[in-house]
Image: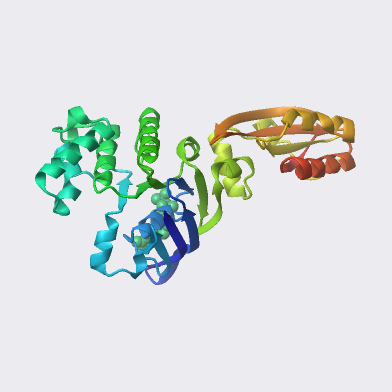
């Protein structure tokens, strides 16, 4: 379990102070896979580095399994860090060591007897599917294989927590999928708590149980993936979901959008699908209740966690008053529907 409490971090850049993290708190329960997403410079790396105190926060606390890392002496911190594995975008393997020797490295540092190291390395190689590459050097491995070695090395000391810093960002889509599958597999087999940072919603969508959105150093939204994907509250979270669905309002509509309604116009609305709702029953009821005709401009539906999520762009035709009432009715009874503007 990871508990991040009110962490702030300011960097001194020349004469100026820059607040990279501003009062961030997160609770990551045992066995969850928690994804933190944000654009470049949002503060993701700083946050994950603060969790194992590679970067020391100015204020706040980091608790791992109930132990407050910020209160420990350096010697105690070295000991507690063994409970935290970490993997990186560029793998950080030792090029002069073989696969087996890389995995053995943290065990050697911990003074573990040779026979025990050998047995543990054999187990870890099997866990990450690299038993046949134990004597290879990193230079002769693919990116995916290198990340498998890094994962095995991170797990050598049997940590309770794994931190993943953009672990799939340097990999092609197929390899990304296999590494994410491996992480999910390890999470289930070992009940490992995983905190990962990424700028790709695909990563969140495929393996995370929870997601936090970070922007300009602040945590702006977080919760179970099902809740965030079906009812995002902030424009930034919506933007990430749109990008993961590869959907946006077609240009032909974007270029014609007007802010003001003129008689005869249609309203263009964006709707996030809520899983438990009967989408089309609601849509068709608008005609009966408000004399509003509804057309679908564009739609994309996908699956996250255990629910459907998706975006619909709708064209609603009717009188202004009826359009306003339909929008209010929809938001109240179903899910938020946003007015983007009007078209002729
Ligand atoms: N050691 C440092 N000294 C000064 N500024 C820093 C330092 N580390 C990070 N920053 C600044 O803090 C901000 C957040 O950086 P961080 O690397 O945490 O963002 P990020 O969300 O991980 O971005 P990216 O996805 O590009 O890696 C950036 O503006 C960065 O320039």
The image shows residue 181 at horizontal and vertical percentages of 39, 32
The image shows residue 16 at horizontal and vertical percentages of 42, 70
The image shows residue 28 at horizontal and vertical percentages of 46, 52
The image shows residue 279 at horizontal and vertical percentages of 72, 31
- Is 315 placed above or below 79 here? above
In the image: residue 204, left or right of residue 250: left
Residue at 17% across, 44% down: 104
Viewer-closest of 164 and 79: 79
Q: Is residue 293 something one can see in this rendering?
A: no
- Is 344 placed above or below 24 here? above
Residue at 74% across, 40% down: 334
Residue at 49% across, 61% down: 24
Viewer-closest of 14 and 59: 59
In the image: residue 291, left or right of residue 125: right
In the orientation shown, which residue stands out farthest toward the left?
A: 114
In the image: residue 185, left or right of residue 234: left
Quarter of image, ligand 1:
bottom left
**Colouring scheme applied when the structure was drawn:** rainbow
To which quarter of the image does residue 91 belong?
Answer: top left
In the orientation shown, which residue stands out farthest toward the bottom?
A: 15
Q: Is residue 70 something one can see in this rendering?
A: yes
To which quarter of the image does residue 302 belong?
Answer: top right
In the image: residue 181, left or right of residue 42: left
Count of numbered marks: 0
Residue at 36% across, 67% down: 70
Quarter occupied by the C terminus: top right
């Amino acid at each position: 379990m990871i508990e991040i409490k009110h962490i702030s971090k300011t960097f001194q850049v020349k004469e100026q102070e820059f607040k990279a993290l501003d009062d961030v708190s997160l609770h990551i329960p045992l066995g969850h896979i928690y994804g933190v997403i944000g654009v470049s410079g949002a503060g993701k790396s700083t946050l994950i580095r603060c969790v194992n105190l590679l970067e020391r926060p100015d204020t706040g606390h980091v608790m791992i399994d109930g132990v407050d890392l910020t209160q420990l002496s350096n010697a105690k911190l070295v000991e507690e860090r063994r409970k935290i594995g970490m993997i990186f975008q560029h793998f950080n393997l030792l090029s002069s060591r073989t696969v087996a020797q890389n995995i053995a490295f943290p065990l050697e540092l911990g003074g573990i007897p040779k026979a025990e190291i050998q047995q543990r390395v054999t187990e870890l190689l099997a866990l990450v599917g690299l038993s046949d590459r134990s004597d290879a050097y990193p230079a002769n491995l693919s990116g995916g294989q290198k990340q498998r070695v890094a994962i095995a090395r991170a797990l050598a000391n049997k940590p309770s927590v794994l931190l993943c810093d953009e672990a799939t960002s340097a990999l092609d889509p197929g390899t990304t999928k296999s590494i994410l599958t491996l992480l999910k597999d390890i999470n289930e087999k070992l009940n490992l708590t995983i905190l990962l940072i990424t700028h790709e919603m695909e990563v969140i969508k495929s393996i995370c149980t929870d997601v936090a959105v970070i922007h300009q150093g602040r945590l702006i939204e977080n919760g179970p993936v099902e809740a965030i994907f079906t009812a995002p509250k902030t424009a930034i979270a919506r933007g990430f979901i749109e990008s993961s669905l590869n959907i946006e309002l077609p240009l032909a509509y974007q270029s014609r959008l007007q802010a003001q309604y003129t008689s005869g116009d249609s309203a263009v609305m964006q709707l996030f699908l809520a899983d438990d709702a009967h989408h089309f029953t609601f849509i068709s009821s608008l005609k009966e209740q408000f004399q509003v005709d509804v057309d679908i401009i564009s739609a994309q539906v996908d699956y996250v966690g255990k629910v459907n999520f998706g975006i619909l762009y709708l064209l609603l035709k009717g009188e202004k008053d009826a359009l306003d009432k339909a929008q209010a009715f929809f938001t109240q009874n179903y899910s938020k529907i946003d007015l983007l503007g009007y078209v002729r």
